[in-house]
Image (cartoon, coloured by chain):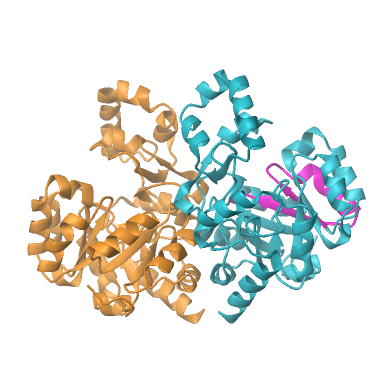
Chain colours: A cyan, B orange
Amino acid sequence: MKPPGSTLALEAVLGIERPILGAPMARVAGARLAAAVSGCGALGFIGGGYGDLDWIDAELSALDPSSIGVGLITWRLDEEPAVLDHVVAAGPRAVWLSYGDPTPHLETIHAAGLVAVCQVLDLDSAVAARHAGADVIVVQGSEAGGHGRPGRGLLTLLPAVVDQISDIPVVAAGGIATGRQLAACWQLGAAGIALGTRLYATHEAADSTAAKRRLVELRGDDTMHSTVFDRVRGPRWPEGYTGRAATNSFVREWHGAVDDLEADLARQRDRYAAGVAADDLDVRVLWAGEAVDLIDDVQPAAAVIREIHGEAADL
Amino acid sequence: MKPPGSTLALEAVLGIERPILGAPMARVAGARLAAAVSGCGALGFIGGGYGDLDWIDAELSALDPSSIGVGLITWRLDEEPAVLDHVVAAGPRAVWLSYGDPTPHLETIHAAGLVAVCQVLDLDSAVAARHAGADVIVVQGSEAGGHGRPGRGLLTLLPAVVDQISDIPVVAAGGIATGRQLAACWQLGAAGIALGTRLYATHEAADSTAAKRRLVELRGDDTMHSTVFDRVRGPRWPEGYTGRAATNSFVREWHGAVDDLEADLARQRDRYAAGVAADDLDVRVLWAGEAVDLIDDVQPAAAVIREIHGEAADL
């Protein structure tokens, strides 16, 4: 724990040169993307998601674990704490915990000398995570793609969190894809930013070319929060979480009729699995944040990060 | 219409010294608040709401109409266009249209030599309003209090709109209460900001002391979007609009059960009216944006505006 009042730069806490984190997008942020992000002076995270250790081990074996971080879903660790022990033993530079109370898991991370990054969706959780010993707070607005919660914009939530937490770095996440947004987040008191959707639309992200092209075409108004994809994919998420994804036929069909979806679940799961197998973007989920409005091309991750950082520094 | 490519400053278009608009909060922004806002170099708007001409005339008679603007709800003007004729004839400096397609009404405003301010909630509406001849675009994120729509944060929607509209001023609205947010909005390309909830918590706003104190106590996470208050108060809003208000017992009771509310409407309307009469904040609506996180006191409006503008200019 840092002594109160001594604000530490994000770069110093994480040993990086650019105050930018690559969000641990489950399965999409693999070794290739994380290595590209870390390779240009930011910090890449592997998206460990629900904790599939075979996948995580395969990705970690493709790089130097100490050069990147690993992200995990906190409420899954409550069910399987051994996943965290395994990840920590692999020696990443940091562990990023999202969606749940990080308190029970911070000791495991700190005992191994790793940095604990805690992602939060509201003010109370930010203060609680700081109190529990988080080294970095990532505050995520509802602009973000993937899992989160509707209802809080980063333009208010970020300064509200910064007002409460002044002694450790607060990182802004959700909807960020440009240097002027990084500059705006600096104005609001952030120590840096996390990039999710913007890095999804890079060569190194682990998804199809069609999926990445769709991100470029999509607009923010064509994305929405829903529980539909979690219901059909499983596992079931705790109450209160939704995910922002591209608005496609599947989510449009079931969003207002989740009871009907649950009643027909076996059949819809087959249909969904077929959509995944065919990479049918009108069926399968494409997690996407409002940042898609500001994404015009699929680029190498390092070019994205250099451009954003350079533009913000110029401003 | 301004020639494309010639960006005009908000101050020049509206004849003001500070790039800040007082949002036309229906009934809450009366002559007293609008005059205080205009009196310190910004531009105050009277909240004409649904178009009650007796109320509007009474407020306009208390000041020089050319020193302020009037806000009206666009979809109501579609039903009663004479309201706009009446307001325009009174000679305000500007008319602010919200919630609906402004196209049919812009000629009336321009024929009288007034400035047309068009508030939008998404990218398509921004481009359409510009094309129709809006002089100023106000882009409102879902952080805002009062009517709007969930789903779009200002941190992404604002730069997306600015990317499309470069020849007239774009004003940022929703959740803004501090100078660092004004500075952040400048970074994102805004020509200025609109203040709603922050001005609600001022001496000059037309509501009870208890209501204003509640705004100071409230936190952004204690506000939510719902249609409950519109259903019980009437008139019925078009599909797609919600309003962000303080989460109180009444909205908590009915938000997930609007069909039950509709089935018991007569009784609940009586109950609601009694809550209004008693200024019972656990029943009556208190429109409130996420900005409440950043509001620590009830102040004079001029002090609020000077502080925000001064802080932003320093940054």
The magenta stretch spans which residues?
A94-123
Q: Quadrant of residue B97?
A: bottom left
Instruction: Answer whether residue A108 is magenta in the image.
Output: yes
Q: Quadrant of residue B301?
A: bottom left
- Residue A257 relative to residue A23: left or right: left
- Residue B253 relative to residue B32: left or right: right
- Residue A104 relative to residue A186: left or right: right
Is residue A27 in view?
Answer: yes
- Furthest-front residue in this view: A278
Which quadrant: the N terminus of chain B?
bottom left
Instruction: Answer whether residue B249 is magenta in the image.
Output: no
Q: What residue do we see at 55% from left, 79% from top? A: A315
> Height in image: B240 above or below B256?
below
x and y, in percent, of residue B38 in the image:
25, 72
- Residue B1 relative to residue A162: left or right: left
Q: What residue do we see at 55% from left, 44% from top? A: A245
Is residue B219 in view?
Answer: no
x and y, in percent, of residue A133 in the image:
77, 54
> Height in image: A135 above or below B219?
below
x and y, in percent, of residue B190 in the image:
41, 70
Q: Quadrant of residue B132?
A: bottom left
